Amino acid sequence: MKGNEELIVVLNTLLKEELSAVNQYMVHAKMYQNWGYGKLHTAIRNQAFDEMNHAEMLIERIILYENTPTVTNINMLNIGKTVSDMIDNDNNEEIGAVNSYHNAIRFARSCDDYVTVDILTRILISEESHLDWAETQRNQIQQMGIENYLLSQVETSNE
Ligand SMILES: [Fe+2]
Ligand SMILES: [Fe+2]
């Protein structure tokens, strides 16, 4: 099936952002685990898997349109040095993702490609939940202080 060429470019750009997020979150998840923050490790590891699922949905759509997905490019990663910076960087990543999906949905709608609109909207729902999670962590750090917050994130993990 042929798709709109410009829309395929947009889908490949989203794919690049998803693959970047997978990498950033995998590294952050392992840093959290290394420091013994089991709850943060589990939360971000699960988000990395969500981003991989998003990448898979985009790849499937690009292949359906008889194109080859670009999986060799990623953006510059923002790996934090402290828990607070890592959460801020991931928060920024999610703000970017929500914006990108809003723009992409608008463009897909202008192409009358309503199935792509539906797929992108399902991903947007997931990105909003990631953004909400990051905002909650930032609020908790602000309200209880970083030390109390970090204490609340200690949990044994077998991963
Ligand atoms: Fe994503
Ligand atoms: Fe996300």
Image (cartoon, grey):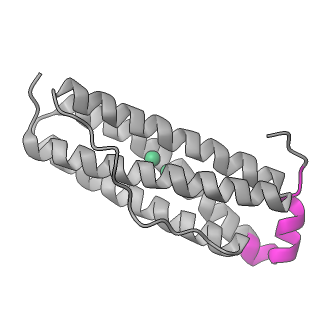
Residue lying at 34% horizontally and 53% vertically, measured from the top left: 73
Quarter holding residue 133: bottom right
Spot the residue most to the front: 72
107 left or right of 139 in image: left
Relative height, residue 35 to residue 9 (above, below): below
Q: Can residue 7 be seen here? A: yes
Q: Residue at x 49, y 44 (%)?
A: 51
Q: Quadrant of the N terminus?
A: top left
Magenta segment includes 150: yes
Q: Is residue 52 left or right of residue 62?
A: right
Q: Which residues are magenta?
A: 141-155
| 129 sits left or right of 123 in the view | right
Residue 101 position, x and y percent, is: 32, 51
Q: Position of residue 50 (x, y in %)?
A: 53, 40
148 shown above or below 23? below
Q: Is residue 105 visible?
A: no
Residue sitting nearer the eye, 106 or 56: 56
Which SS type dominates the magenta stretch? Answer: helix
- At which x and y percent is residue 92? 49, 68
Q: Which of the image's four quarters has the C terminus?
A: top right
- At x 88%, y 71%, the residue is 148
Quick check: 152 above or below 121?
Answer: below
Task: Looking at the picture, tell me which residue is in the foreground, 117 or 71.
Answer: 71
User: Does 21 appear in magenta?
Assistant: no
Q: Position of residue 109 (x, y in %)?
A: 16, 42
Q: Nearer the viewer, residue 70 or 133?
A: 70
Q: Residue at x 60, y 64 (%)?
A: 135
